[in-house]
Image (cartoon, helix red, strand yellow):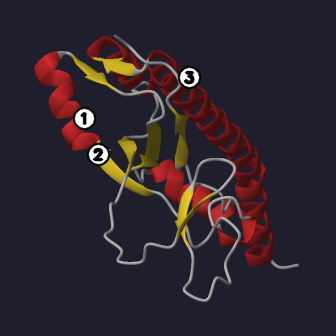
Amino acid sequence: MDGFGRVVVLIVAGLLLFMIPFRNKAIDYQGYDKNQLEVYTKEFADRVMESGYIDIEMYENYLSILSPSINTYEIEMVHSVKTLIVMRVDNTNTNVCDKGHYYFRKDDGSDEICPYCNDSNKEIIQPYMDKTYTKDILEKLYTSGIYYFNKGDYFTVNVRNASKGPVINLLEVFYNDTNKNYSYGGMVYGEFF
């Protein structure tokens, strides 16, 4: 092997000697950071769903927990409420099932199964949701100091990694899963009065 080949081999060996441990440590940190994001987001959302409200202290504590990370996060909060749509129907052929659901029969009487109770109609009957997003939630939170939910409402927190720093760019060379988006939420089961 000539001198040029030896220099190339030494450079490649040197890069591999330093890059592989760096890659492993960076992947470990990414996993740790993503795990922390998921844990703290879940704790925040669970606390909101349990108490039935968000106050300024809860929200700012959540933000302060996420701030030491090297990443910048965009946080979206969604408050969803099931709404009822009233529809005028001229058909007076109504039935009431055993569970108390009112439904309309076809004129020929062919549909004698309640569509609300029938599992095959899940895609046909969907609840309508009225949603309030982060901007409106924060506006109400910072004007009155608290944002209330009703029992049965839905609360979701969506967190997206908004930073794309040099570590992330370098990790994308070696490791495909640099996605730090996380979503968590559910039904509010506590009500604050």
Which residue has dot 2 on it?
Answer: 133
- Give the number of the mark in front: 3 or 1: 1
Which residue is rendered at x = 76% and y = 51% of the image? 20
What percent of the width, then of the height, locates residue 58? 37, 16
Which residue has dot 1 on it?
Answer: 137
What percent of the width, then of the height, locates residue 80? 39, 45
Left or right side of 40 for 68: left
Instruction: Please name the amino acid that badge 2 sits on.
Output: Tyr
What percent of the width, then of the height, locates residue 25? 70, 39
Q: Quadrant of residue 1?
A: bottom right
Which residue has dot 3 on it?
Answer: 43
Q: Which secondary structure, mark 1?
A: helix
| For the residues bearing labels 1 and 2, Cβ distance under 8 angstroms | yes
Left or right side of 135 for 14: right
Q: In which quarter of the image is residue 78?
A: top left
- Residue lying furthest front in this view? 92
Looking at the image, residue 100 lies above or below residue 91: above
Which residue is rendered at x = 69% and y = 50% of the image? 98
Q: Answer few, some or many: residues within 10 Å of disc 1's Cα (few below 14, many 20 plus, some between 14 and 19).
A: some
Looking at the image, residue 126 lies above or below residue 90: above
- Residue lying furthest right in this view? 1
Query: Could you tell me how far apart the alpha carbons at marks 1 and 2 are, in whole angstroms?
Result: 6 Å
Which residue is rendered at x = 31% and y = 70% of the image? 88
Query: Could you tell me how far apart the alpha carbons at marks 3 and 2 are, in whole angstroms?
Result: 20 Å
- Considering depth in this image, is 124 or 136 the residue closer to the camera? 124
What percent of the width, then of the height, locates residue 55? 30, 16
| For the residues bearing labels 3 and 2, Cβ distance under 8 angstroms | no
- Residue lying furthest bottom in this view? 108
